[in-house]
Amino acid sequence: EIVLTQSPGTLSLSPGERATLSCRASQSVSSRSLAWYQQKPGQAPRLLIYGASSRATGIPDRFSGSGSGTDFTLTISRLEPEDFAVYYCQHYDSSRTFGQGTKVEIK
Amino acid sequence: EVQLVESGGGLVQPGGSLRLSCAASGFTFSTYSMNWVRQAPGKGLEWVSYISSSGNTIYYADSVKGRFTISRDNAKNSLSLQMNSLRDEDTAVYYCARENGATIYGYYYYYGMDVWGQGTTVTVSS
């Protein structure tokens, strides 16, 4: 079973700064199988990125995904106030494993 | 409007049973795979179960295997999760989520869980 480890656990940044979130898989996975989600308190998750680097419908271009093999990255180029949230990476195979999440908080 | 609406949550004693439902609207339900994902209080997301569009392929997380049963009724645009032998650790908000993907030249391209319901709360406690 593939385990996804996200780092850091918490990222403290100011609006306008760049956020770099990491997701490491316990073994190599296909880029086709990697997605990222955003979740705000009291809300359902929202799909941001699929296929490691493709933005979902309606997602602003300040969000970008990259990576391959075991190392994947979600980058938010300039943080907007609405971007402070928890972010999860997720891998699909016979299961649909989530990472433990990275909280992006206001510094 | 594309929408998923969960129902059926509530308070149940350990060892009890509960059946969750998810009503889909605004899209052709029978052409999409579906998932249940849960979130314990203050914790991260945990995938629970998957069912293919036809219902022929089903997967479960190890934590619920043998206790939970996923099913769907494409004629009624409905997804269900039968939960038996409930434990304290099953306490969570349960989300149904549409899975988007396509098989192209034999490869499955996973486009993520692109539509989510608002969640229904299950509390297991004596």
Image (spheres, coloured by chain):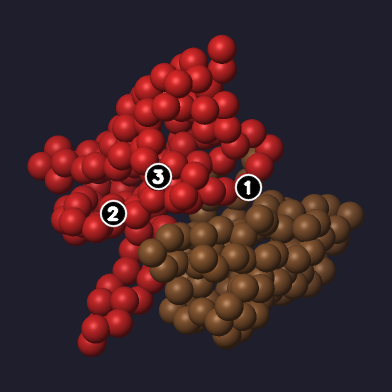
Name the secondary structure under disc 3.
loop
Measure the C-alpha gap from mark 2 to mark 3.
11 Å
Compare marks 2 and 3 and give the one earlier in the sequence.
2
Q: Please tell me which residue lies in front, A9 or A80.
A: A9
Q: Quadrant of the C terminus of chain B?
A: top right
Colour brown, chain: A
Q: Is residue A1 left or right of residue B18?
A: right
Q: Colour of chain B?
A: red
Name the residue located 45 percent from the left edge and 74 percent from the top edge: A33
For residue B76, which numbered disc appears in the image?
A: none
**Location of mark 3 (residue):** B65
| Residue mark closest to the camera, 3 vs 1 | 3
Name the secondary structure under disc 1.
loop
Say if labels 3 and 1 share a chain: yes
The x and y percentages for residue A63 are 62, 71
Amino acid type indicated by mark 3? Lys
| Residue mark closest to the camera, 2 vs 3 | 3
Seen as rendered, the residue at the extreme left is B75
**Location of mark 2 (residue):** B58
For residue B44, which numbered disc appears in the image?
A: 1
Q: Residues within 10 Å of mark 1 (few under 14, many from 20)?
A: some
Amino acid type indicated by mark 2? Ile
Query: Numbered disc 3: what chain?
Result: B
- Compared to residue B6, the image places residue A15 above or below, namely below
The x and y percentages for residue B52 are 25, 57
Name the residue located 24 percent from the left edge and 42 percent from the top edge: B71
